[in-house]
Image (tube, rainbow, N blue to C red):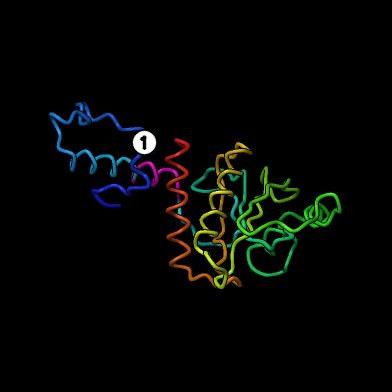
Amino acid sequence: FKAQRDLELRFLALPTRDRGWDWTDRRRTCVELQEFLQSKDERTQFDEAVKILQGDIGYINDIEGRPLDGIAFPTNSHLTNHYVGAAQAVFRRAGRGLHDHVNDPSFRGRRPTGSAVATPAFDAGVKKLIHCVGPRITMPNCFELLATTYENAMSAVLHEELTCVTIASISTGNMGVPCDEAAQVALRTIQKFLRANHW
């Protein structure tokens, strides 16, 4: 975060914090200070809403004492268990019901890259699972597709009315997207989502 706000975020309204004086009045406060204060408010909102954890998604049950009600994780285009990484951990956590659900002929099918699909959580101990079909590093527009995947995951969170969700890093395992670049895409996309939805 910096004093000058990102141009893509400039037009998204942000709830402002009361400072005891009207800092939005251009006669009293210069544009640079207004942008700095808006950026500070945005950073505070982001820090309150987003926590970065390291752990096994198969065993995370709460975030700072708040029980999870959703898990978003990377998966293949058929949403089936491919027995590696976060998908394997979530399928193990959810039990046989998830395996049967995604393999049911009425549900089964190929989903496009960038999609996110909510399913029942079965024995996972949360309300919903969000299956995220991320891109491979070799795909054209890989990072745009990765942002779309996170946007769709967050839209599913909103649609399912979830309030505390853990999201495993998408496309950084077998799909080959470098962790640093993937993290930047993820955090920027989540930041935009929080702004756009006043979450």
Left or right, 32 with respect to 83, comes to: left
Residue reaching furthest right?
A: 105
Q: Which residue is disc 1 drawn over?
A: 14
- Please tell me whether the stretch drawn in magenta is mainly helix, strand or loop: helix
Check the image and report above or below for 135 versus 18. below
Q: Kindly identify the residue that appears in the image at 59 percent across and 55 percent down.
A: 60
Q: Nearer the viewer, residue 113 or 37?
A: 113
Q: Is residue 132 magenta?
A: no
Q: Kindly identify the residue that appears in the image at 54 percent across and 53 percent down.
A: 150
Q: Secondary structure at mark 1?
A: loop
Q: Kindly identify the residue that appears in the image at 39 percent across and 38 percent down.
A: 12
Tell me which corner region of the image, top left, top right, bottom left or bottom right, holds residue 83. Answer: bottom right
Tell me which corner region of the image, top left, top right, bottom left or bottom right, holds residue 10. Answer: top left
Q: Nearer the viewer, residue 133 or 169?
A: 133
Q: Position of residue 155 (x, y in %)?
A: 57, 43
Q: Position of residue 193 (x, y in %)?
A: 47, 44
Q: Position of residue 53 (x, y in %)?
A: 49, 57
Q: Nearer the viewer, residue 50 or 147?
A: 147
Q: Residues within 10 Å of mark 1 (few under 14, many from 20)?
A: some
Check the image and report above or below for 25 versus 76. above
Residue type at tag 1: Leu
Residue reaching furthest front?
A: 140
Q: Position of residue 138 (x, y in %)?
A: 56, 73
Tell me which corner region of the image, top left, top right, bottom left or bottom right, holds residue 76. Answer: bottom right
Q: Which residues lie in the magenta part?
A: 43-50
